[in-house]
Image (tube, grey):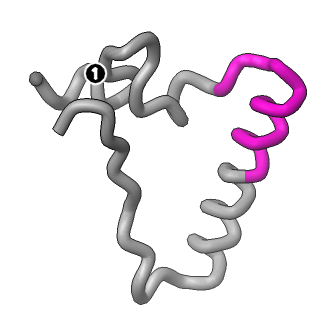
């Protein structure tokens, strides 16, 4: 599926897990709006290629 990002299903997640997810989303958005780099472990795709953990876990 080119040009698509997959996100985790959060049904049944604990409140603490959802809080960590929300904190990560906030960090990503703050970096984006401040024009700072987003941490590599948060990236799914970079420059049209798989990035982060996905780059080491999957092949296309």
- Left or right: residue 4 versus residue 39 is left
* Residue designated by label 1: 55
Residue visible at 32% across and 15% down?
49
In which image quadrant can residue 54 be found?
Answer: top left
Task: Please state the horizontal and vertical placement of residue 26, each as a whole percent of the image.
Answer: 77, 51
Q: Nearer the viewer, residue 26 or 20?
A: 26
- For the stretch drawn in magenta, the main secondary structure is helix
Residue projecting furthest to the right:
34
Q: Could you tell me which secondary element the residue under label 1 belongs to?
A: helix
Residue projecting furthest to the bottom:
12
Task: Please state the horizontal and vertical placement of residue 50, each as a whole percent of the image.
Answer: 31, 22
In which image quadrant can residue 48 be found?
Answer: top left
> Is residue 57 depicted above or below 11 in this figure?
above
Which contiguous range is marked in magenta? 26-38
Number of numbered labels in the structure image: 1
Residue visible at 71% across and 18% down?
37
In which image quadrant can residue 45 be found?
Answer: top left
- Left or right: residue 21 versus residue 53 is right
Task: Please state the horizontal and vertical placement of residue 16, each as a whole percent of the image.
Answer: 64, 76
Residue visible at 17% across and 39% down?
1
Task: Please state the horizontal and vertical placement of residue 13, each as a whole percent of the image.
Answer: 47, 81
- Mark 1: few, some, or many residues within 10 Å (few <14, many ≥20)? some
| Residue 32 lies in the magenta-colored region | yes
Residue projecting furthest to the front:
3
| Residue 34 lies in the magenta-colored region | yes
């Amino acid at each position: 599926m080119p040009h698509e990002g997959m996100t985790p299903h959060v049904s049944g997640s604990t409140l603490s897990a959802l809080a960590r997810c929300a904190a990560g989303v906030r960090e990503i958005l703050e970096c984006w709006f401040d024009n700072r780099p987003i941490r590599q472990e948060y990236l799914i795709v970079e420059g049209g290629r798989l990035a982060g953990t996905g780059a080491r876990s999957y092949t296309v």
